[in-house]
Image (cartoon, grey):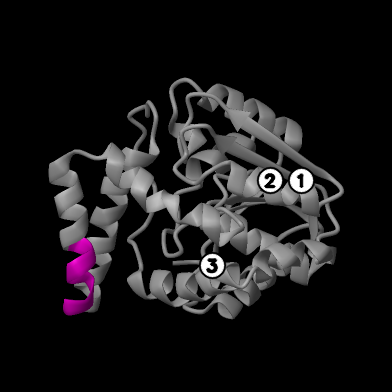
């Protein structure tokens, strides 16, 4: 897998950063849509440490982008984009956070409860079985279980999803585990929120009102911490706005206006 996929003829002034960690390719529909108004990079994060992913993304942007670029980070990719913008502010013109995880631990505790409450009992039971089985299987088995877990949780994350083909590549458990544990610890210590002191660019957060990641965990901390911050809440919208029947059109409209 190449480190980046390019959309449009360039110059590449926008980059879409996928979630996961370890779920490359899922931002393809967004990259395709945005390529009608700008050259878009879709980097693939493969490193198994947080620092590795930061440096990997920095390298791709330096080699292929017209710096500074606008970063559109989704879910985990929103945190990764945030960290890169704090560490290397000269590389980032604007930061757009889509479905961003909460910045403080107290808001993160409700995510799993909300997801499980929305699932049917059979799906809840299968989620628990997957979580219990992840430690006792091969690497290929872990990748397969992580992919199945993602499908199940996506049911809880979406409000009214259209039948949109999945364009992601295979899930990578080693990337997920290696990176997210580090990020979760940084959030617990409030280190990620404190990176706001180093953010120099405008920040826009686009969030669905049905997203299990609580909007208050993004809007509340960032509106206090940042001098140039805008929060946009989309109605009838889950974690991935581009798949929602009632919100995708509004999502793309505000996204294009933001970049």
Crowding at dot 3, Cα within 10 Å, few <14 / some 14-19 / many 20+, comes out as few
Q: In this rendering, would 80 be left or right of 151?
A: right
In percent of width and height, residue 76 lies at: 52, 58
Contact between marks 1 and 3 (CB within 8 A): the answer is no
Identify the residue under disc 2.
220
Q: CA distance from mark 1 to mark 3?
A: 34 Å
Looking at marks 3 and 2 on the same chain, the residue that comes earlier in the sequence is marked by 3
Q: Which mark is residue 3?
A: 3
Decide: is 214 above or below 53.
Answer: above
Residue 108 visible from this viewpoint: yes
Which stretch is magenta?
Answer: 130-137
Q: Which residue is mark 1?
A: 223
Note whether 197 is above or below 255 in the view shown. Answer: below
Answer yes or no: do the residues labelled 3 and 2 have beta carbons within 8 Å? no
Q: Residue 209 vs residue 191: left or right? A: left
Task: Say if the magenta span includes residue 48.
Answer: no
Image quadrant where one finds the N terminus:
bottom left
Pinpoint residue 189: horizontal percent, then vertical percent.
Answer: 61, 73
Q: For the residue labelled by badge 3, is the local secondary structure a helix, a strand or a loop? A: loop
Residue drawn at x 56%, y 75% as measured from the top left: 50
């Amino acid at each position: 897998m190449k480190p980046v996929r390019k959309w449009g003829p360039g110059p590449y002034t926008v980059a879409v950063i996928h979630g996961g960690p370890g779920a490359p390719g899922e931002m393809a529909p967004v990259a395709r849509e945005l390529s009608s108004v700008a050259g878009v990079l879709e980097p693939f994060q493969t490193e198994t440490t947080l620092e590795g992913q930061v440096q990997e993304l920095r390298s791709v942007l330096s080699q292929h982008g017209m710096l500074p670029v606008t970063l559109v980070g989704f879910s985990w990719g929103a945190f990764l984009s945030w960290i890169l913008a704090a560490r290397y502010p000269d590389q980032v013109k604007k930061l757009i956070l889509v479905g961003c995880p909460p910045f403080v631990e107290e808001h993160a505790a409700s995510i799993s409860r909300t997801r499980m409450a929305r699932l049917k009992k059979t799906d809840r039971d299968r989620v628990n079985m997957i979580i219990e089985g992840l430690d006792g299987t091969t690497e290929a088995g872990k990748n397969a279980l992580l992919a199945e877990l993602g499908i199940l949780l996506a049911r809880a994350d979406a409000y009214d999803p259209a039948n949109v083909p999945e364009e992601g590549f295979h899930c990578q458990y080693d990337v997920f585990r290696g990176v997210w544990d580090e990020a979760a610890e940084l959030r617990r210590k409030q280190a990620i929120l404190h990176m706001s002191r180093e953010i120099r660019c405008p920040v826009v957060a686009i969030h669905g009102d049905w997203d299990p990641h609580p909007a208050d965990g993004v809007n509340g901390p960032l509106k206090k911490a940042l001098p140039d911050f805008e929060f946009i809440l989309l109605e009838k919208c889950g974690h991935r706005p581009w798949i929602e029947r009632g919100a995708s059109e509004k999502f793309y409209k505000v996204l294009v206006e933001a970049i």
